[in-house]
Image (cartoon, rainbow, N blue to C red):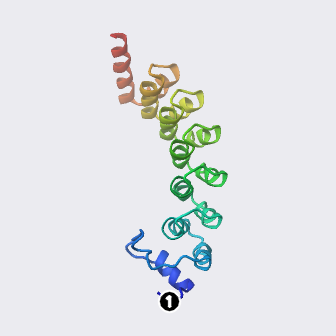
C-alpha cells in the first residue's frame, strides 16, 4: 500500500459500507505517527479506538483523547485498550448512565460516588448498579430505581431482599406491579 492520504483514511475508517473491522481489515494500514494523527484529526471516537486496538495495539494519549469524545468509546478504550481506569475515560463515561454503570462494573471493578450518581440518572441503571456494583442497597440507588415501578420491584426483590415503604409506593403506581408486589409479600409471610 502506498502513502495514505487523508481521503484514504476517511474512506478506510468512515466510508466503509460494511463496517468491517478487525486485524484483517486493517492489515495493510501502516503504523505511523503521521497516520495516527490523520485518524485522530477526523475526530471520530470509533476510528481512534480501532486505530489503537488494531494498528497501534496499545494506548496513546492521542487516540484516548479522541475516543473519549463518546461515553461508549471511552468505556471501550478503558476496558480493552488501557485495561485500567483513567480520569479522562471515567469522566466521559459518566456522562451516560449506562456507560457509568458498565465502567464501574468492568473497569473500576468497584463502586465510586461519581459513577453511582451518574448511573442513578436512569432507574434501570440504578437498580443494576446496586445489584452488581454496590452489591447492597443504598438510599441513592433505591430512590433512583423507584422512579420506575418495574425497577422498584426488582430492587425490592433482588437488592433490598425485602419490602420497603419506598419500593411499595413506587410499585403501586402500576396495577400489575402492585399485584406482583402483593403476591411477593404474601409469599414472604409464608416462609
Question: Residue at position x 45%, y 25% from top?
Answer: 156
Percent x, y of residue 170: 48, 28
Can residue 14 be seen here? The reply is: no
**Residue 34, image quadrant:** bottom right
Under circle 1, the secondary element is loop
Residue 60 appears in the rendering: yes
In terms of depth relative to the viewer, which is nearer, 7 or 120? 7
- The residue indicated by pointer 1 is 2
Relative to 116, does residue 156 appear above or below in the rendering? Answer: above
Residue at 36% from the left image edge and 20% from the top image edge: 184
**Measuring 57% from the left and 27% from the top, which residue is drawn there?**
138
Q: Is residue 27 above or below residue 96?
A: below
Apparent side of residue 155 relative to residue 183 in the rendered image (left or right): right
Q: Quadrant of the C terminus?
A: top left
Give neighbour class at mark 1: few <14, some 14-19, many 20+ (Cα, 10 Å).
few
Q: Could you say where residue 85 lies in the image, as x and y percent from the top left?
A: 60, 49
Taking 82 as reference, is 41 above or below it? Answer: below
- Residue closer to the observer: 53 or 153: 53
Q: In the rendered view, tell whether residue 13 sits above or below residue 72.
A: below
Residue 158 picture location, percent across and down: 43, 27
Lateral position of residue 43 relative to residue 182, left or right: right
Amino acid at each position: 500500500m502506498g502513502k495514505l492520504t487523508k481521503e484514504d483514511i476517511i474512506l478506510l475508517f468512515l466510508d466503509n459500507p460494511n463496517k468491517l473491522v478487525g486485524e484483517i481489515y486493517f492489515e495493510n494500514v501502516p503504523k505511523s505517527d503521521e497516520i495516527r494523527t490523520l485518524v485522530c484529526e477526523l475526530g471520530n471516537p470509533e476510528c481512534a479506538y480501532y486505530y489503537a486496538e488494531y494498528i497501534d495495539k496499545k494506548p496513546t494519549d492521542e487516540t484516548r483523547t479522541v475516543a473519549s469524545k463518546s461515553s461508549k468509546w471511552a468505556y471501550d478504550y478503558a476496558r480493552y485498550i488501557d485495561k485500567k481506569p483513567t480520569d479522562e475515560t471515567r469522566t466521559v463515561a459518566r456522562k451516560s448512565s449506562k456507560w457509568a454503570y458498565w465502567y464501574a462494573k468492568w473497569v473500576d471493578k468497584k463502586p465510586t460516588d461519581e459513577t453511582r450518581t451518574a448511573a442513578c440518572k436512569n432507574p434501570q441503571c440504578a437498580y443494576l448498579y446496586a445489584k452488581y456494583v454496590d452489591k447492597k442497597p443504598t438510599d441513592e440507588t433505591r430512590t433512583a430505581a423507584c422512579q420506575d415501578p418495574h425497577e422498584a420491584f426488582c430492587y425490592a426483590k433482588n437488592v433490598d431482599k425485602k419490602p420497603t415503604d419506598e419500593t411499595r409506593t413506587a410499585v403501586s403506581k402500576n396495577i400489575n406491579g402492585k399485584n406482583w408486589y402483593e403476591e411477593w409479600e404474601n409469599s414472604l409471610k409464608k416462609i
